[in-house]
Amino acid sequence: MTVFGGNAFNIARADRGISVQTVGDNSAFLTLIPTSAYAGYSDNMLRLAFDGSFDAQNASGLPEDANFTFTDIFAIRNEGQDSIAVTLSEYYNAVDWDTNFPRAYYTYERLGTTNDRMGAGEFTGDVSNDGAVLSPGDELFVHFEFVGREEDSRRTDTDEPNTVSVYAEAVNTDG
């Protein structure tokens, strides 16, 4: 009698059900939370506006040749089970933050009315190098600095993006 060890089959198929639900930004695995008068939900999606379109805003936009820093615009919370790295993108179909208007940066705590313009890091569109890592249940706060003065040579792009996308990918925390 010959006995063979190993697998009992070469190919198998087992059908299983899957349940997927699409939810709004306020209850997804990657939750986007408005934390200022410049962010709010529209059709369950986070929307940013610096043009007076939200009721809590008392102005209709930013003046030319002026610098503004807006802190704690919105929060990004990891409601998943794995650690993730996040960045911002100004495109739907690519991950890149080409613009300097606004400069986007983050902190792990609310800044409030402090004058911290550096934060914990800057969003560049490079998820692996931005350093914005969130463990499950953690959140970070997104801030924007609009620089419109001509004499500031660091900033040459003054066209704001039409889109702000949040991109996340899992990170290996095993070392």
Image (spheres, grey):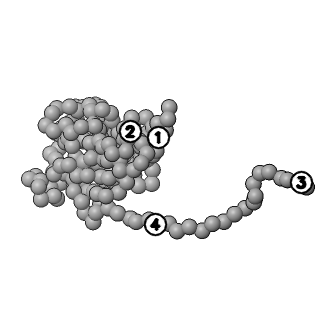
Q: CA distance from mark 3 to mark 4?
A: 45 Å
- Can residue 118 be seen? yes
- Identify the image quadrant of the N terminus: bottom right
Residue ID for mark 4: 19
- Local SS, label 2: strand
- Can residue 158 be seen? no
Number of numbered discs on residues: 4
- Local SS, label 1: loop
Type of amino acid at the residue the image marks with label 3: Thr
Where residue 147 appears, x then y in whole percent?
23, 38
Q: Residue at x 19, y 51 (%)?
A: 38
Residue ID for mark 1: 171
Q: Cβ–Cβ below 8 Å for labels 2 and 4?
A: no
Where residue 33 appears, x then y in whole percent?
26, 52
Of labels 1 and 4, earlier in sequence is: 4
Type of amino acid at the residue the image marks with label 1: Val
Q: CA distance from mark 3 to mark 1?
A: 48 Å
Residue ID for mark 3: 2
Q: CA distance from mark 2 to mark 4?
A: 28 Å
Q: Nearer the viewer, mark 1 or mark 4?
A: 4
Of labels 3 and 4, earlier in sequence is: 3
Where residue 107 appears, x then y in whole percent?
27, 36
- Local SS, label 4: loop
Residue 133 badge: 2
Asked if residue 38 is positioned above or below residue 104 in the image, the reply reads below
Q: Cβ–Cβ below 8 Å for labels 1 and 2?
A: yes
Q: Judge the density around disc 4: few (<14), some (14-19), many (≥20) Cα neighbours within 10 Å.
A: few
Of labels 3 and 1, earlier in sequence is: 3
